Image (cartoon, rainbow, N blue to C red):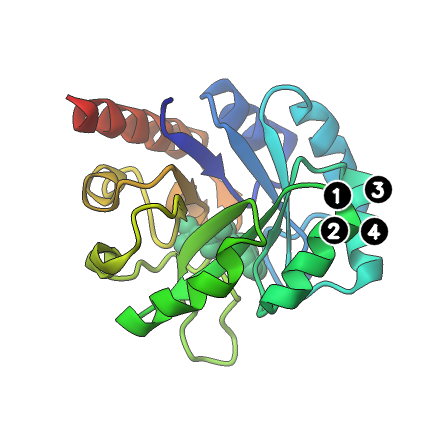
Amino acid sequence: MDILVKICGLSTPETLEAALGAGADFVGFVRYPKSPRHVSLDLGHKLSLQARGRARRVVLLVDPTDEAIAQAVEAINPDLIQLHGSESPQRVAEIRSMVKRPVMKAVGIAEPSDLQALTPYADGVDHILLDAKPPRTGQALPGGNGISFDWRLLDGLDRKLSFMLSGGLNPDNVAEAIRLTKPKAVDVSSGVESGPGLKDPARIEAFIRAARTAFAAARH
Ligand SMILES: O=C(O)c1ccccc1NCC(=O)[C@H](O)[C@H](O)COP(=O)(O)O
C-alpha cells in the first residue's frame, strides 16, 4: 500500500483538477466561513461531482451543529468527514453514528502530553489527523495555518495507531516528515499555495511526487 495523500482546502475546479490529475487520494473542501478556503454548499456540490470516483471527498467542519452537518452531507456527499474543532470524543462518536460515514478527527500536537489526548478518540473514529496547534492569536484559524509541530514528539506514539500527518508540510519538507514519522497518509493545504487560499498546481504536483518518492525510498 502506497502512502495516501490529501490535498485540503481546494476551492476551484482548476486546482481540484490539478490535485486529481496529480493522483491525490483525498481532496478536502473546507466549510468554515472565516477561512479563505471556505466553499459554499453550491460550490462544494459542484466540486464534489467533479471528484466523484477519482478521489475520496472530504468535508472539513469545525464544531458543527447537526444542521450544518446535514446540509454539508446532503450538498457535498462526502466520503469522509473531517472534524477540526474541539469536538469531544462523545460528540465525534455521535456525529459518526448520525452520518453513517467515516469520520476523521484532527488533534493538535504541541507537547508530549498531547499524545494522551488521542486515546479517547482512537476507538471511535476511522482516522486520526495529527496537526499543529493553531497560534494563540485571536485571528488564527483552527487549522490550515502552515505551521509544523516537532515531529520527534511522535517517537512516543503507540505505533499501532495509524495516522495522517499534517501541519506545515510542503514539497520541500514532506520527505523528511515521512522518514521521521512513518505516517499512513499526509495532508497539506498552505504548503501548496501561492497565497492564502490560492492553490498552486505546480506545488500540488511537486508535493505528491515528493511524498510518493520518499515513501518508496523508506521501503527499501
Ligand atoms: O484550511 C482552513 O482554512 C481550515 C480552517 C478551519 C479549520 C481547519 C482548516 N484547515 C485544515 C487543513 O487544511 C489541514 O487539515 C491541516 O490543518 C494542515 O494545514 P496546513 O498546515 O496549512 O498544511
Give the foreground label among 4 and 2: 2
Residue assigned mark 3: 74
44 with respect to 132 (left or right)? right
Residue 98 makes an appearance in the image: yes
Q: How many marks?
A: 4
Disc 2 and disc 3: Cα gap in Å?
Answer: 16 Å
Disc 2 and disc 1: Cα gap in Å?
Answer: 5 Å
Ligand 1 within 8 Å, label 2 CB: no
Q: Secondary structure at mark 3?
A: helix
Give the foreground label among 4 and 1: 1
- Identity of the residue drawn at 19% across and 42% down: 176
Relative to 45, say whether 69 is above or below: below
39 and 158: which is toward the camera: 158
Residue 156 image-quadrant placement:
bottom left
Residue assigned mark 1: 100
Name the residue type under label 1.
Answer: Lys
Q: Position of residue 151 (x, y in %)?
A: 24, 55
Do tag 4 and tag 1 residues touch (Cβ < 8 Å)? no
Residue assigned mark 4: 70
Give the foreground label among 3 and 1: 1
Disc 4 and disc 2: Cα gap in Å?
Answer: 13 Å
Do tag 2 and tag 3 residues touch (Cβ < 8 Å)? no
Relative to 176, say whether 63 is above or below: below
Relative to 213, say whether 106 is above or below: below
The crowd level at tag 1 (other Cα within 10 Å; few <14, some 14-19, many 20+) is: few
Earlier residue among tags 3 and 1:
3
Do tag 2 and tag 1 residues touch (Cβ < 8 Å)? yes
Residue assigned mark 2: 97
